[in-house]
Amino acid sequence: MIAVWSAITLYVLAFVAFAYDLSQRASLAPAKQRGTVLVGAATGAAPAPPAPEPAEPSLRVPASERSRRYWARLAIAFTGLGFVLHLAATIPRGVAAERVPWANMYEFALIGTLLIIAVYLAAVRWFDLRFLGVFIAGMVVFFLGGSAMSFYVEVTPLMDPLKSIWLIIHVFVASLATALFAIAAGLSTMQLLRARRERLQAQGEGSVEQGRGYLRTLPNSDALETLAYRFAILGFIFWTFTLIAGAIWANESWGRYWGFDVKEVWTFVIWVLYAGYIHARATRGWRGTKSAWLSLTGFAAVLFNFTIVNLFFKGLHAYSGIS
């Protein structure tokens, strides 16, 4: 548990550093670059060209800009160190249990939040998603800290139905899909905020430039939506495999592929929600805020499945570990 709480502490420091970096973005970003698309790869277009160099360029970076870069780098460093300690807490749990460490709610939270951080750190190598760090670090602190306080249980032997290779396949793929859905949800949240600002600008609200300055430095809402959609599609592919793997495992354990167990039903509900989101955006033209709200509805169902369903609904999948 020492490694877990040390990782949480580092994630809290990352949250603070990300928040400070976000607060500095508006005041330090050049006016001509505010509101431009910073994630060129998200739209398939190249990023906007940099402003022309002055006649006598200075090699010195302004102190304010150095400070912002410092906080952004520090936030990523805290996140990376937290990930290392998080991994250091997860591996010994599996070694002690002599199995994969995802057989109860505490272990689900341990591996799920670990994969969220892993996906985020991988994503920032291709996209400038430091503005999303507050959302990701805050969510991981909330769920990992809450699980450590409320769901922690000692290592216990596996129930007979869990003694299968499908435990590794099914749960890992489901956790990876959840991590991708979490990134998509964060992007959709930022999309809604950015879209509101763009609507106010279009209506000629003169005070928009002075308020909520950090929104000026985000990619435009179309770029955020496109990138969220890509993460959601990838998550949907893994969630589809989760559904298939779960059916195969159910047949191996209980002799049937589908039994309308509450966990099975909610897994299918989540699949339907994301399938509807992808279909509506691709074929029905549900873009903008409609698309964002569908993405957030799907992620809300994922969270409901992990928390409320595991804690308050009884069934064959009652493996929360909480008595």
Image (spheres, rainbow, N blue to C red):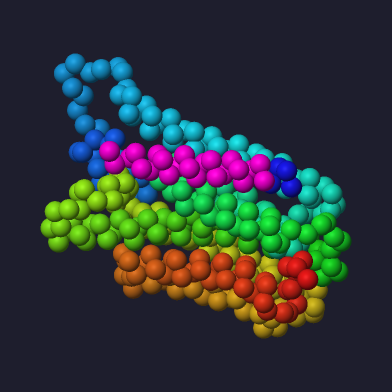
Magenta span dominant secondary structure: helix
Residue sitting at x 51%, y 75%: 272
Q: Residue at x 33, y 29 (%)?
A: 65
Seen from the viewer's position, the closer of residues 82 and 52 is 82
- Magenta residues, start to end: 5-27
Looking at the image, which residue is at 34% across and 70% down?
290
The answer to whether residue 139 is left or right of residue 84 is left
- Residue 41 place in picture, x, y as percent: 37, 45
Q: Residue 172 falls in which quadrant of the image?
A: bottom right
Above or below residue 296? Residue 71 is above
Quadrant occupied by the C terminus? bottom right
Picture coordinates of residue 309 (x, y %)? Answer: 64, 74
Who is closer to the viewer here, 117 or 144? 144
Furthest residue in direction bottom, as rendered: 260
The answer to which quarter of the image holds residue 150 is bottom right
Of 230 and 184, nearer the camera is 184
